[in-house]
Image (tube, grey):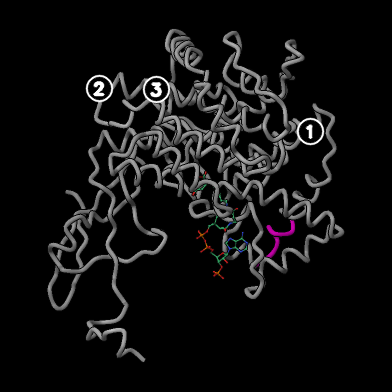
């Protein structure tokens, strides 16, 4: 027999069904709460509120578990390419050889970006933030594919937009990187795999057609993109769902997700972490000073890359990235002093009651920037790389929301402002 929740309000008892997920998570279904009781719930930041059921990603914050469609992030990061994991997240199964080849071929056929977009791109101010450029470019794709403005199209038409986004995102990200360096765009090459193509467009030179990325870099980039591919109802994925629920196009919804990710409390944290570590290094490397600042309620400073809404033990992605950071820097012969500062900071925080009591541990953003920098990317480009990884997750969340025919997202509120006041003409106002 299914469980029920009983709520007593103003002397009346109301019953609401309890639903249970495939991993034992439980929720009180309050979809009839207001009609039955005249009450709503209030939960700023939705810390206790579920917006949907989902089959894409499972997190267990206490046990540090992250799975996509039932596969552990450890298995996926160690054994798959980013496109295999993207296929899994988008279509619900790990692809066989025929499926992955067809997926890769479809993507290869759509990697070019309309030259008209390039004119708009060239007008972006030099030095403007890469995330602002990215969200603008992705939104502008809808100007070139106006049929995609209608999300109520047959599945194969929607999938064409999915393929276009997956294909053009690396090209646009690389264009932004090249612009930062004042270098000409390097076009995609159809004979390269997804990640190698991205690295070639980023680090290859028009004058050096024979550039070949280090296999260590290709492997690390695949792993980093996999580790960012989806993360259930995080701020940016929820944004994509909310925007998509109004029947806005997939391009508009993804552009909104990019903007939400940009925030320093979310994906923008990977840039903030490196800037924080650099500040600590330049300030003499006194990690305790910065731990004390992070604990001081009068100081706005936060330990960037620490803490998580869900993970209250450890972020499994941070563990994988930390190991990978050691490997990549060693293989590339990079000696980055901020890596040692990061490790020292982590060790000190893990012993500090403030962080232990609040269950604040390194999250995915704490070590990722150290690898990105070792690969040759600048700090303000790190969140673009996060977005490149998160794209399949955002698309899949949008598709699931539409598959499940969610109504437009429109939360309620409790009004606490002025009650009715008599209108006073301007010439009589004090
Ligand atoms: C990502 O949701 C996702 O899944 C996101 C993500 C994904 O893959 O999509 O995992 C990616 O966004 C990772 C998070 C990156 N952000 C940061 O590293 C920024 C620093 N971290 C925090 O700002 C914070 O930890 C959050 C935003 C991540 C979580 O915030 P919550 O859950 O709202 O927690 P909170 O702000 O209510 O903090 C609870 C307590 C507070 O202290 P008290 O009021 O109880 O005394 O912990 C403190 C906070 O002051 N706290 C911190 C802290 N994080 C929380 N204190 C110092 N340094 C920090 N980093």
Q: Quadrant of residue 369?
A: top right
Mark 2 or mark 1, earlier in chain: 2
x, y percentage for residue 77? 57, 29
Which of labels 2 and 1 is toward the front?
Answer: 2
The circle on residue 329 is 1
Dot 2 crowding, Cα within 10 Å, few <14, some 14–19, many 20+: few
Can you identify the residue that label 3 sits on?
93
Distance of mark 2 from mark 3, alpha carbons? 21 Å
Q: Most prominent secondary structure in the magenta stretch?
A: helix
Q: Nearer the viewer, residue 325 or 425?
A: 425
Residue 248 among magenta residues: no
Q: Secondary structure at mark 3?
A: loop
x, y percentage for residue 275? 72, 51
Q: Secondary structure at mark 1?
A: helix
Quarter of the image with the C terminus in it: bottom left
Q: State the extent of the magenta-drawn residues as a range.
A: 347-353
The residue positioned 32% from the left and 24% from the top of the image is 158
Q: Residue furthest right?
A: 284
Q: Is residue 48 left or right of residue 344?
A: left
x, y percentage for residue 49? 34, 56
The residue positioned 39% from the left and 47% from the top of the image is 238
x, y percentage for residue 309? 49, 55
Which of labels 2 and 3 is toward the front?
Answer: 2
Mark 2 or mark 3, earlier in chain: 3
Can you identify the residue that label 2 sits on?
154
- 56 to 91, vertically: above or below: below
């Amino acid at each position: 027999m299914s469980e029920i929740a009983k709520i007593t309000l103003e002397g009346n008892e109301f019953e609401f069904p309890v639903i249970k997920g495939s991993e034992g998570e439980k929720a009180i279904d309050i979809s009839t709460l207001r009609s039955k009781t005249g009450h709503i719930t209030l939960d700023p930041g939705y810390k206790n509120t579920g917006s949907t059921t989902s089959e894409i990603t499972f997190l267990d914050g206490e046990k540090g578990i992250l799975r996509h469609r039932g596969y552990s992030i450890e298995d996926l990061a160690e054994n798959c390419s980013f496109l295999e994991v993207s296929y899994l997240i988008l279509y619900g199964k790990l692809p066989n050889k025929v499926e992955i080849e067809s997926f890769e071929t479809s993507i290869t056929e759509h990697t070019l970006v309309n030259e008209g977009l390039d004119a708009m791109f060239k007008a972006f101010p030099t030095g403007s933030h890469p995330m602002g450029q990215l969200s603008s470019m992705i939104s502008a794709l809808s100007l070139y594919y106006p049929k995609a403005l209608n999300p109520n199209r047959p599945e194969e038409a929607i999938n064409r937009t999915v393929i276009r986004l997956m294909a053009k995102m690396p090209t646009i990200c690389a264009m932004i990187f090249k612009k930062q360096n004042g270098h000409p765009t390097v076009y995609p090459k159809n004979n390269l795999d997804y990640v190698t193509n991205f690295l070639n467009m980023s680090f290859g030179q028009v004058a050096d057609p024979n550039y070949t990325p280090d296999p260590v870099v290709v492997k690390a980039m695949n792993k980093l993109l996999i580790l960012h591919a989806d993360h259930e109802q995080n701020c940016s994925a929820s944004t994509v769902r909310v925007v998509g629920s109004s029947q806005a196009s997939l391009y508009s919804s993804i552009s909104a997700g990019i903007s939400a990710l940009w925030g320093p409390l979310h994906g923008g944290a990977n840039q903030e972490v490196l800037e924080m570590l650099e500040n600590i290094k330049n300030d003499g490397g006194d990690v305790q000073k910065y731990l004390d600042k992070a604990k001081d309620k009068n100081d706005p400073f936060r330990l960037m890359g620490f803490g998580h809404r869900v993970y209250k033990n450890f972020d499994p992605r941070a563990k994988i990235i930390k190991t990978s950071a050691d490997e990549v820097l060693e293989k590339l012969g990079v000696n980055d002093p901020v890596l040692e500062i990061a490790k020292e900071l982590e060790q000190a925080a893990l012993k500090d009651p403030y962080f232990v009591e609040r269950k604040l541990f390194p999250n995915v953003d704490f070590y990722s920037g150290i690898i990105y920098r070792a690969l040759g990317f600048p700090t303000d480009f790190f969140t673009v790389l996060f977005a490149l990884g998160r794209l399949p997750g955002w698309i899949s969340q949008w598709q699931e929301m539409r598959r499940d025919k969610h109504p437009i997202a429109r939360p309620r509120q409790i009004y606490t402002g002025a009650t009715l006041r008599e209108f006073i003409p301007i010439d009589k106002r004090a």
